[in-house]
Image (spheres, rainbow, N blue to C red):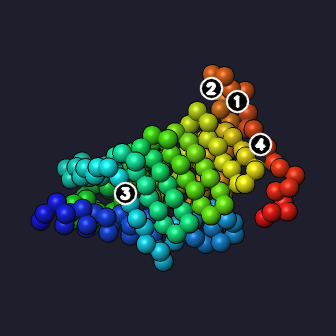
Amino acid sequence: MTVNERTHRFGAAFLFALAVAGGAHAAAADRSTGLKLTGDKPIQIESDKLEIKEKENTAIFTGNVSVTQGDTLMKSGRMVVLYAKGEGSAATGSAAIDRIEADGKVYLKSATQVATGDAGVFDMKSEVFVLTGKEVVLSEGENVIVGCKLTVQMKTGRAQLDGCGGNSGSSGRIKMLISPNSAKTQ
């Protein structure tokens, strides 16, 4: 099997896994305008480099990583896809994705919301997404909330933002700015 065939099959498996994971989130996303992944739109992944480590059940996208589906965009410096052991092969696209890790300034944008942080982890089994950093910033229009750890339960749509608790130069508290005109524009 050629490298191009492996890359194509890996890409198909990755997109399928994101679509399945997003399917659970789509029901929760219908209640809000937050980050959405759905199974009915194609996902485009771009990076400067893709390295598949079949023996380690890992695929690593590096350099200007960009993942797009509909109105949702994720950018990072690096994205690592870890496969469940004994669940097939990353190169053939038959592997079950266990976890997706992104780092190097993670940027997530949906139609109306933006979230930024230093690193993000999506656990496929528990369907939990965690975005962390020196500052995790969520914004919608002029409204901004800042903390250091955002945890999103994709199954329920529940999200929790934790303060920075002891980071140098930080009060450890959540900071929120709400514009009085924001309710009129939404």
Outermost residue, left side: 1
Disc 3 from disc 4: Cα separation:
33 Å
Q: Earlier in the sequence, mark 3 or mark 1?
A: 3
Tag in front: 3 or 2: 3
Disc 2 from disc 4: Cα separation:
18 Å
Q: Quadrant of residue 24?
A: bottom right
Question: Which numbered disc covers residue 172?
Answer: 1
Outermost residue, right side: 180
Disc 3 from disc 2: Cα separation:
33 Å
Quadrant (top left, top right, bottom left, bottom right) of the C terminus: bottom right
Q: Earlier in the sequence, mark 3 or mark 2?
A: 3
Q: Could you tell me which secondary element the residue under label 4 belongs to?
A: strand
Q: Could you tell me which secondary element the residue under label 2 belongs to?
A: loop
Kind of residue at badge 4: Met
Q: Earlier in the sequence, mark 2 or mark 4?
A: 2
Q: Earlier in the sequence, mark 3 or mark 4?
A: 3
Say which of 47 and 30 sits in front: 47
CB atoms of marks 1 and 2 within 8 Å: yes
Instruction: List the residue tagged with mark 2.
Output: 167
Instruction: List the residue tagged with mark 4.
Output: 176
Kind of residue at badge 1: Gly
Kind of residue at badge 2: Asn
Tag in front: 2 or 4: 4
Q: Quadrant of residue 83?
A: bottom left
Instruction: List the residue tagged with mark 3.
Output: 46
Tag in front: 3 or 1: 3
